[in-house]
Image (cartoon, rainbow, N blue to C red):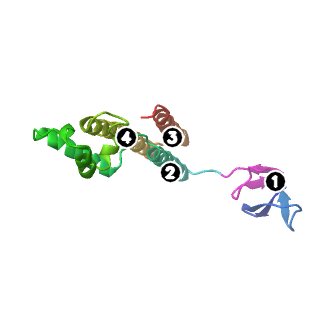
Amino acid sequence: MRYVILNEDGVVKTMFLESPPQHAVSAPDFVEPGYRLVDGEFIAPLIDIETMRKRAVTQVNNLYASIRKETPGVPYAEKQIEALEVIRMVERGENPNGISASEMMEAFPVLSASVGTEVDTLSDAAALILKRHKQASIFDNEIESIRLRAKKDIRSALSLADIEAAYHKAINALEALADNGG
């Protein structure tokens, strides 16, 4: 059973116990510190506009961070560096596909792992990695744009309803982008 300890300002502590401690009242599960007991009913605390703004921005930031961690196809730095070196070889008129397997493993140890598995040549591997990097950058820019626009809209909102609308617009846009995989 859930019990709460009250003072003149409202609920100060909640707990789950077998039997009520002294000066405790049973309460529904949703009751948290800050609720008040008025005429036998628990009343939610009023939320001021600045608290609502902070909560909305925090939740948008948290979802943004979660999506960024899950972004598929983002190559790690070494693979990207090697891909850029292959492109520079091509720009210098060299043929990266003409080197032996041992030379390829020595010069491009990370990128060469894609040759024969994802693609047929070192040049194709470099192109694939750079394409993935570009797609990931576009995705990152899109979610960052949504996040920054949401923060601006939330901070400039004049009412709780406007804050909630800006928050839901951002959350829906971020979730849609994440669902589509960027």
Q: Which of 23 and 118 is in front in this view?
A: 118
Residue 8, x across and y down, in percent = 75, 64
Gap in angstroms between the C-alphas marked 2 and 4: 16 Å
Per the image, the residue denoted by label 3 is: 167
Report the residue at 39% width, 44% height from top: 148
Which of the two residues, 59 or 48, is positioned nearer the viewer here?
59
Residue that lies at the very extreme toward the bottom in this rendered image: 22
Looking at the rendered structure, which numbered label has been put on residue 27?
A: 1
In x, y percent, where is residue 81?
26, 49
Q: Which residue is rendered at x = 46% and y = 31% of the image?
A: 180
Inter-mark Cα distance, 3 to 2 = 10 Å
Q: Cα distance, mark 4 to mark 1?
A: 43 Å
Helix, strand or loop at label 4? It is helix
Sequence-first disc among 4 and 1: 1
Disc 2 target residue: 58
Please tell me which of labels 3 and 2 falls first in the chain: 2
Residue position marked by numbered label 4 in the rendering: 145
Q: Main secondary structure of the magenta part?
A: loop
In the image, what residue type sits under mark 2? Thr
Which range is magenta?
27-45
User: Which structural element holds mark 1?
Assistant: loop
Q: Which mark is residue 93?
A: none
Left or right: 47 as drawn, with respect to 44 = left
Horizontal placement of 35 versus 72: left or right? right
- Does label 1 or label 3 sit earlier along the sequence? 1
Q: Earlier in the sequence, mark 3 or mark 4?
A: 4
